[in-house]
């Protein structure tokens, strides 16, 4: 009827108008209200994209300001005053007197020496044992998952429970350690009242609790070492010990440095183990302050002697020591990066 074969004429709307939805229909231009709505949505999207990350981290920032930054600044302010814990609202300005008194305070230097010696006695064997345990776990063992969980068990144990058990083990009269020494023909040791013996006993508690934790850190780093390095060393005739010395240890240098710094910071803040180790010694750290650490001395000044200003000065002295440790860590890490 006037159409070519194989084609279909488009339907016509009444009156000859093109029906809506056909290809020839042009979209109507958005009106002013629609443009305003689109602009508002665009602004909301840009604001959401810009401020939503800050909103997500705001709970952490609020808690940090309330329980981190404010106590730090308030402690620094209190360290410049004479203030007692019984009346913390009354402050008397003394300037740097609390710090100068620390310089001449033999108990502060004794606590600093004890903190250093206990830190060395606990950190060095702890990290060496953790490295050896991680090396063993890095090879194929039966029930490897069981052993990994087992070595982490001391870390999950309460400090109070572990320290009280070790206090019984190192008991003078009925302790298991003195019983074993007696079987070997060695006289009993007064672990709690001796100088080096008490520090060695406290260090043993720290070693027992943190060795497994550091071993898992080393294990994770070892599993990231490329296997091609071990295969190349084996082809060159290197033994397991030589592979450990020349492949594993160099690859773990950043991790070893990290654990050394973290363990040093933990040793500087050591508190629970020496507090609970001595029977009735409390914050004094033994009858002759033989294992009183900086944390114990801070507690003794602030919550036993009630000198909040002196305790605040000790806290800031510990903070400065930690900053010094962080600076040494940064310097060593920078040299390691340059040597690679």
Image: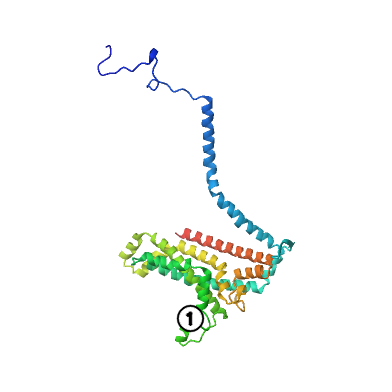
Extreme residue toward the bottom, this view: 185
Q: Nearer the viewer, residue 39 or 97?
A: 39
Q: Secondary structure at mark 1?
A: helix
Q: Nearer the viewer, residue 98 or 57?
A: 57
- Mark 1 residue crowding within 10 angstroms, few (<14) / some (14–19) / many (20+): some
Farthest-out residue, front: 14
Instruction: Residue 228 in the image: state x and y as whole percent.
Output: 34, 59
| x then y, percent, for residue 291 | 58, 75
In this view of the protein, which residue sits in the foreground, 12 or 244? 12
Quadrant assignment for the C terminus: bottom left
Residue receiving disc 1: 177
- Which image quarter: residue 319? bottom right
One can see residue 106 in this view: yes
Seen in the image, is 166 located left or right of residue 141? right
In the rendered view, tell whether residue 43 sits above or below residue 241.
above
User: Whole-percent x and y of residue 1?
Assistant: 27, 11
x then y, percent, for residue 237: 31, 67
Q: Residue at x 53, y 48 (%)?
A: 56
- Residue 98 relative to residue 8: left or right: right
Residue 101 to residue 223: above or below: below
Residue at (35% x, 61% y) in the render: 229
């Amino acid at each position: 009827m006037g159409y070519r074969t194989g084609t279909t004429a488009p339907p016509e709307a009444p009156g000859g108008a093109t029906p809506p939805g056909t290809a020839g229909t042009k979209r109507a231009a958005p009106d002013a209200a629609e443009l305003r709505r689109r602009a508002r949505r665009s602004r909301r999207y840009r604001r959401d994209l810009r401020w939503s990350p800050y909103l997500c981290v705001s709970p952490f920032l609020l808690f940090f300001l309330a329980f981190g930054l404010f106590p730090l600044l308030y402690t620094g302010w209190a360290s410049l005053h004479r203030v007692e814990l019984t009346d913390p609202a009354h402050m008397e300005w003394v300037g740097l007197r609390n710090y100068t008194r620390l310089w001449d305070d033999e108990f502060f230097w004794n606590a600093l020496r004890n903190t250093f010696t206990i830190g060395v006695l606990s950190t060095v064997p702890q990290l060496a044992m953790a490295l050896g345990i991680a090396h063993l776990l890095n090879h194929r063992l039966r029930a490897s998952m069981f052993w990994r969980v087992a070595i982490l068990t001391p870390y999950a144990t309460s400090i109070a429970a572990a320290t009280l058990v070790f206090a019984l083990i190192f008991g003078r009269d009925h302790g298991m350690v003195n019983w074993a020494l007696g079987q070997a023909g060695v006289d009993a040791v007064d672990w709690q009242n001796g100088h080096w013996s008490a520090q060695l006993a406290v260090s043993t508690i720290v070693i027992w609790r943190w060795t497994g934790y550091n071993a898992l850190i080393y294990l994770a780093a070892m599993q990231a070492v490329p296997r091609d390095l071990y295969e190349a060393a084996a082809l060159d005739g290197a033994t397991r010990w030589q592979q450990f010395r020349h492949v594993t240890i160099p690859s773990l240098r950043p991790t070893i440095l990290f654990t050394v710094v973290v363990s040093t910071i933990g040793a500087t803040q050591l508190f629970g183990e020496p507090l609970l180790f001595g029977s009735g010694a409390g914050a004094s750290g033994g009858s002759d302050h033989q294992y009183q650490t900086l944390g114990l001395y801070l507690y003794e000044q602030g919550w036993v002697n009630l000198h909040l200003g002196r305790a605040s000065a000790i806290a800031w002295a510990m903070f400065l020591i930690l900053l010094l440790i962080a600076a040494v860590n940064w310097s060593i890490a920078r040299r390691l990066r340059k040597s690679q």
